Amino acid sequence: MNSFTLRMCDADAEALTATLEQQGVCVVPDWLDRRTIEALREELTKSLPAPRDNDDGAFNPGRLVALKRSEIADRLPETFRQFSNPVFENVARNYVGGRFSFNDDIFVSDHTEDRREILPLHYDRLWCLKFYFYLKDTTRNDGAFEAIPGSHHAGHRRRTYLLSRGMRAEDLPNRTDPLGFDGVLPLEGGGGTLIVFDSDVLHKGGVVGEGGRRLVMRGHTHRVPKNVYRPNRWSAQWRREARLNPITALRRFGDKLLGADQRLKL
């Protein structure tokens, strides 16, 4: 069993990158000032759809909208400015280490009181680096983001191993914890807190309790080429996931012969 404690880090690209490499997640309080928070909240309200009625799914859906950064400069100028921050781009360049699409997807969400979790403990099937803002003071009762710092190395090994054996991204068993970790930490913070995390880290969205509310914006930076759930025919990802791919078939056979699949608890 492993447990990890979270260190706060300084607000420069080098310190953010170093903390990400060690912990998979880092938190910077007071990244946004009050005026910026107010402007982002106005743009969040403008962007969100109407509340849903009679949603009976397993998780708290809240109100959520996906945006393309390339399309919002005129309509949501403060959101565009914050997710175009050159410090973030330098972190992405340092951390990804190759070609990437910088904060191309932005998600805006509002979750209110609900007995269901926002999301269970998981790593993402489609890898990305996330830049995440609290737009109000956020405690555990508000459904604060939760994570297991340091678990990103194991999450990365498990995800990339399964993909290299031909498993489709959409089939990755990411909502279980066979990795032997404990120590899930609610990352509470004031309005304006920045959280940056590697999506291989085990993380979850909490439960919004009585009187609670979670207002969040997050940007997703992806490696290029980007993994998707429906790859284009004959793309590298499509070939890797093809059932008759002889390379992945040999890898699976070798793993079974050597017991590697059992060691990874697959």
Image (cartoon, helix red, strand yellow):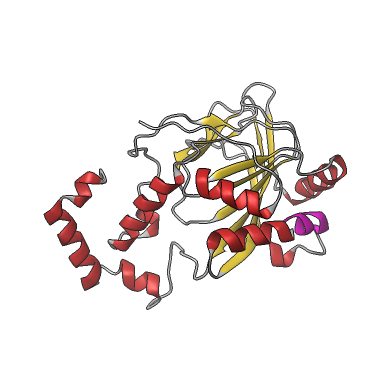
Let me know if residue 198 appears in the view: no
Let me know if residue 82 appears in the view: yes
Nearer-the-camera pick, 38 or 44: 38
Q: Residue at x 63, y 57 (%)?
A: 91
Picture layout, residue 108 above or below residue 169: above
Picture layout, residue 184 above or below residue 244: above
Q: Quadrant of residue 106?
A: bottom right
Give the magenta-colored segment's residue range: 76-83
Residue 95 coordinates in the image, percent (x, y): 56, 58
Picture layout, residue 253 above or below residue 202: below
Nearer-the-camera pick, 46 or 190: 190
Q: Is residue 79 magenta?
A: yes
Quarter of the image that includes the N terminus: top left
Q: Residue at x 46, y 63 (%)?
A: 228
Residue at the farthest right position: 35
Nearer-the-camera pick, 120 or 159: 159
Residue at the farthest bottom position: 234
Left or right of residue 214, residue 207 in this image: left
Residue 27 coordinates in the image, percent (x, y): 64, 40
Left or right of residue 68, residue 241 in this image: left
Q: How many marks?
A: 0
Residue 164 coordinates in the image, percent (x, y): 31, 62
Q: Residue at x 68, y 57 (%)?
A: 88
The secondary structure that dominates the magenta segment is helix
Q: Residue at x 52, y 43 (%)?
A: 23
Residue 248 coordinates in the image, percent (x, y): 24, 66
Q: Is residue 53 magenta?
A: no
